Image: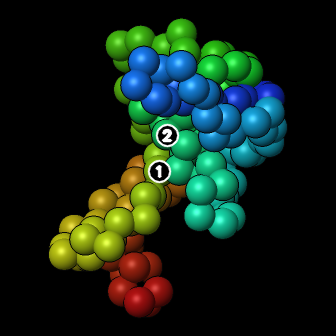
Amino acid sequence: MLELGKISKIYKTGTFGGKKLLAVNNVSFDVKDGEVISLIGESGSGKSTIGKMILGLISISSGMIRLNGVDIATLKGRALKDYYRKVQGVFQDPFSSYNPIFKADRIFRIIREEFFPKINNREWDKKIDSSL
């Protein structure tokens, strides 16, 4: 389970970082194994900032993010690679549709590896073809 506990992000702005911008304030939620979530909200509400913190792209100012009880800030090496296999983001990007086949193929491969590791190639291809 992925747990976010009272995470906040404060950006320092201004010429010398004297001003502070509270981008995310005490957000908490859990994502259970196998669950897929979407962050939805108005422009500037902190969705991208939360996603970046979950993915470790930016640090959190306060609070904690844990996967199966382990603080993600402590992950290194193999443990960090394993984390990125389990937790992935899909960012809104108007230019990301240039190669939709590659992206779909990658998503199907990840789904297969995680949820259907025992299905052979032929059976998997049949399952995908029937779904499309």
Is disc 2 surrounded by few (<14), some (14 to 19) or many (20+) residues within 10 Å?
A: some
Mark toward the start of the polypeptide (1 vs 2): 2
Instruction: In the rendered view, tell whether residue 77 sits above or below residue 4.
Output: above
Question: In the rendered image, which residue does mark 2 sit on?
Answer: 52
- Nearer the observer, disc 1 or disc 2? 2
Residue at image x 59%, y 56%?
Answer: 44
The numbered disc on residue 89 is 1
Q: Position of residue 71 (x, y in %)?
A: 64, 16
Q: Position of residue 31 (x, y in %)?
A: 73, 45
User: Does residue 47 appear to the left or right of 130 in the view shown?
Assistant: right
Residue at image x 52%, y 25%?
Answer: 12
Q: How many marks?
A: 2
In the picture, the quarter occupied by the C terminus is: bottom left
Residue at image x 63%, y 21%?
Answer: 61
Is disc 1 surrounded by few (<14), some (14 to 19) or many (20+) residues within 10 Å?
A: few
User: Does residue 36 appear to the left or right of 117 in the view shown?
Assistant: right
Examine the image and state in which quarter residue 73 appears.
Answer: top right
In the picture, the quarter occupied by the N terminus is: top right
Q: Position of residue 126 (x, y in %)?
A: 37, 81
Badge 1 amino acid: Gly
Instruction: In the rendered view, tell whether residue 121 sits above or below residue 12.
Output: below
Badge 2 amino acid: Lys
Examine the image and state in which quarter residue 40 appears.
Answer: bottom right
Residue at image x 59%, y 64%?
Answer: 43
